[in-house]
Image: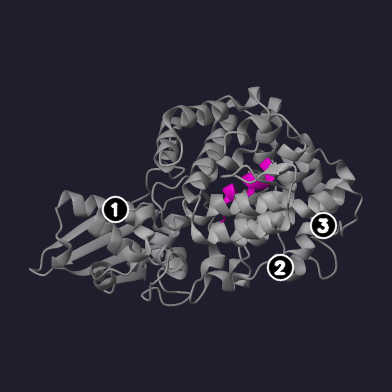
Amino acid sequence: MTTTDELATFAGEVSFDELPDEVVEELKKRVLDSLGIAVGAMGATPVEQVRRTVEGANADGACRLWGSDRRAPSDDAAMLNTALVRYLDFMDSFLAPGETPHPSDNVAAVVAMGEAGDVSGADLLAAVGVAYEVQGELAWNAPVRDRGWDHVTHTVLSAACGAAHVAGLDYEEFRNAVGIAGTAHNALRVTRTGGINEWKGVASANTARNAVYSVMLAAQGMEGPTNLFEGQKGWKQVVSGPFEIDPSPECSRVFDTMTKRYVAETYAQSAVEGIIELATAHDVDPGEVVAVRLDTFAGAKLIIGGGEGSRYEVETKAQADHSLPYMLAAALIDREMGVDAYDPKRIRREDVQTLLRTVDVEEDPALTDRFEAGEMPAHLEVELADGTVHRVEKADFAGHPNNPMSWEDVVAKFESLTDGRYDAAHREAVVETVRTLEDHDVSDLVALLD
C-alpha cells in the first residue's frame, strides 16, 4: 500500500554515500542542465512578472533570487527559480506510458530549502535523487493526465519529498509535509488543453512554492493528513485511482529521464530531429513543400498534435512550443530549434505560418506500442511540389534514455544557454562547482547564479 509512511521510510534510507557513482553523475547532469536553462530564461516576460511579484512581496530572506542580488524566503525563491528552470520548455522529462512530467521542476525547490539550511552539496544531490525517484514512480504507476489532472499534481509531492529530505525533517514531520502538499495542491489539466496560455510555463513554479511552504509548515509542527493516499476521499479515491510504488534508495529512476536537445515539447524531440536531418540531407526548399506528414504515438497526437485542441492557431510562445505543426515547420525552415524559434516576430512570419498548415499529424497504434516499450518513434514524409517525397524514420533522439547525453554534451548545452550572460571564466566556475558538488555547500553554487 502506498502511504506517507512508505515515502518517509524510503527517504530516510537515501543518503549520498549510498548512491551509486553513475546515479550521482546523472544527478549532477540534471542540476547543471537546470541551471543553464534557468540562466537562458532570465529576462523572459512571464518570468520577470513572477520576479516582480516575488520582489514586491519580500524585502529579504534566506535564499537568492537567481539572476539578481535580491533575496527572499524559501517558498518565494522556489517560485521564481523554478519558473526560470521551466519557462523555456527546454527542461528534462520522465518518459512513462501515461504521464510525462518534468523532474527538473523539483531542482529549484530543493536548492532553496538546502540554501536556507546551509547544507552540503552532497545532501543536495541526495535530496534531488529523492525527488526524481518519487516523480518517476508516480508517473509510471499513478498517471493522472487522463483523469483531468495536470502532471504538476505529482510534482507537489516529489518536490515536498525532496525539500523535506534536504531540510532534515524527521519521520513525522516528513509525513505531515507530504500530507499537506498532496491534500491542498492538485492542479487541473485545463492548463494544457485548448488555447494554451503562459500559465503552462509557470504552473510547476507555483507547485514548487506550495511544496516548500508545506515543508516549512511541517517543520514548525503543523500536522497534515498522513492518510493522504489511502484515506476516505483521499488521493487514490479522488485523484489517481489505486496504485503502488516501489521507490529505490539508489534513486535509479533518474536513468529514465531524458534531456532535451531542442527547445520543444518533450514528445516533439524525435520528430524535430528527424525533420532537421531530412531537410539538411536533401537541401529541402521550404517554398516547394506542399505537405508534411507525421505518424506518431498517442501521447504526441493528444498533447501537441491536436487531440486536446487545435494546434494550427499559433501566435505566442506558449502555443508554439505545444504545436507539432509549428515546431516541424519552423525546424524545416530554420534547420534548428532553439530559443530564437519562439521570438514573437519569428512565430508570426508568413513562411512558418503558411508551412505549418501543410502539416498533418496522425497516431499510428504501432508507434504507440513502441513508445510504451521505451522508444520515442516518429515517421516523417515531406512532399514537394514536383511530387518528390522524402522520408525519415526515428526511434529516439540525442538525449533520450536510449541515447543519453554525456557530461560533455550537457556542458555544451549549458554554455550555449549562458554565454550571453556569463563570461568563459564564470561559466567554467559553475560547471566545475556542479561537477564537484559533493565538495561544496549549496551556498557556493547559488553565489554563482547572478
Dominant secondary structure of the magenta stretch? helix
Residue at image mark 2: 239
SS category of the residue bearing label 3: helix
Image coordinates of residue 185 in percent, x first then y, are 73, 64
Name the residue located 47 percent from the left edge and 43 percent from the top edge: 401
Label number found at residue 124: none
Question: Closer to us: mark 3 or mark 2?
Answer: 3
Residue type at numbered disc 1: Gly
Q: Is residue 140 magenta?
A: no
In the figure, is residue 262 to the left or right of 78?
Answer: left
Q: Is residue 368 above or below residue 113?
A: below
Residue farthest toward the left in the current orientation of the protein: 386
Residue at image mark 1: 274
How packed is label 1: few (under 14 Cα within 10 Å), some, or many (20 or more)? Answer: many
Please provide the residue range marked out in magenta.
101-111
- N-terminal label among 1 and 2: 2
Label number found at residue 179: 3
Residue type at numbered disc 3: Gly
Mark-to-mark CA distance, 1 and 3: 44 Å
- N-terminal label among 3 and 2: 3
How packed is label 3: few (under 14 Cα within 10 Å), some, or many (20 or more)? Answer: many
Image coordinates of residue 436 in percent, x first then y, are 58, 24
